[in-house]
Image (cartoon, grey):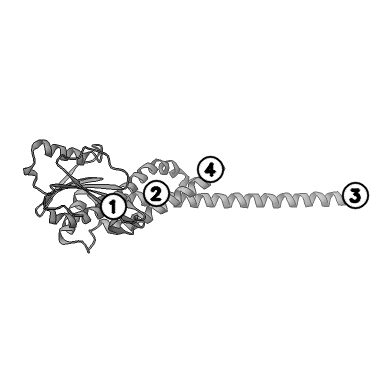
Amino acid sequence: MQPGPTEKMVLYRIRFVAQAQSGETVLLELKDPYTCRAVLVAVGVETAIPKPSFPKPDELEILAIACKPMDLSENELGNVESWVKSASNGEKTLISLRVEEAQVLWSPGKAVFYAPSNRVSPMLTALTEFAFYEGELSKLEGEIAAGWPEAETDAPLAYEVTRHHLPRHKLLAERSFRVLQWRMRHVRVEPHLHGPAPQLSELGRKLGERLRRETGVEDRLEFLDGKIESCEYIYEMVSQRMGEYQNFHREFLLELLIVLLLGAEAIVLVVELFIIRR
């Protein structure tokens, strides 16, 4: 649904779901880092700017306003800005940029287009594509930040493992596998964040490029790559040390068993000789 000629504002709600329901409009189909569909619902807004609200996870709200910012009152402009900022609880900076004749305000989870009605569709598709991949990058950043203290705690095991650490083998294996999953997700998301999809319109590609530049996704990808590489090194070394110690422990037990068997055999021989000589 596109804004009609008399509709000043249209609110677009986009949900990222695994499978669209019957009758839902699929705006985009996404395949990395997992199969996902962006389904779209458009709602006409009468006059007032929607009240600030925090979007649900895996949702995006875009308010398209078919006029220029100068056509709104100072109070209305403030309400628009508050509505966009409400997506991040003030934790992230509001991004404002201009692409051709359109003005865009963006914060993770929400955006506003000041643009003619006929320019909304290509911008809507481009911003939805960017928002999905930027959101996946943010999730990955959050997970790695949460797991970093664990990696720091486990780092000493890359150089020394004792028998007291053996009960942690399963936990360490799970953390190592989690790092592998981080790497796989990073590899799948990275190409989509280096540039917008080639099938987008020229306006959509311009918007995508500007959003990527303003949010610094290339630097974020590089920084994240370094953190994943560090975790990979830590858990590769931990796995190696743990394996070496387990092999040593098994070999030690085997050698001890052999020594005990030989000792038992020697005792039996001594007893037999003693009995024979009597």
Give the amino acid at mark 4: His
Give the amino acid at mark 2: Cys
**C-alpha separation, residue under disc 1 versus residue under disc 4:** 41 Å
Percent x, y for residue 123? 18, 55
Element under disc 2: helix
Q: Which residue is mark 2?
A: 231
Give the number of the mark in front: 3 or 1: 1
Which mark is first along the chain, 2 or 4?
4
Which mark is first along the chain, 3 or 2?
2
**C-alpha separation, residue under disc 4 versus residue under disc 3:** 49 Å
**C-alpha separation, residue under disc 1 versus residue under disc 2:** 26 Å
Query: Quadrant of the image for the N terminus?
Result: bottom left
In the image, 158: left or right of 87? right
Specify few, some or many for label 4: CA neighbours under 10 Å numbering under 14, 14-19, or 20 or more: few
Percent x, y for residue 101? 9, 53
Element under disc 1: helix
Q: Which residue is mark 3?
A: 275
Q: Which residue is mark 1?
A: 132
Which mark is first along the chain, 1 or 3?
1
Percent x, y for residue 194? 24, 57
Which mark is first along the chain, 4 or 1?
1
Q: Quadrant of residue 30?
A: bottom left
Q: Which residue is mark 4?
A: 165
Element under disc 3: helix
Closer to the camera in the image, 204 or 234: 204
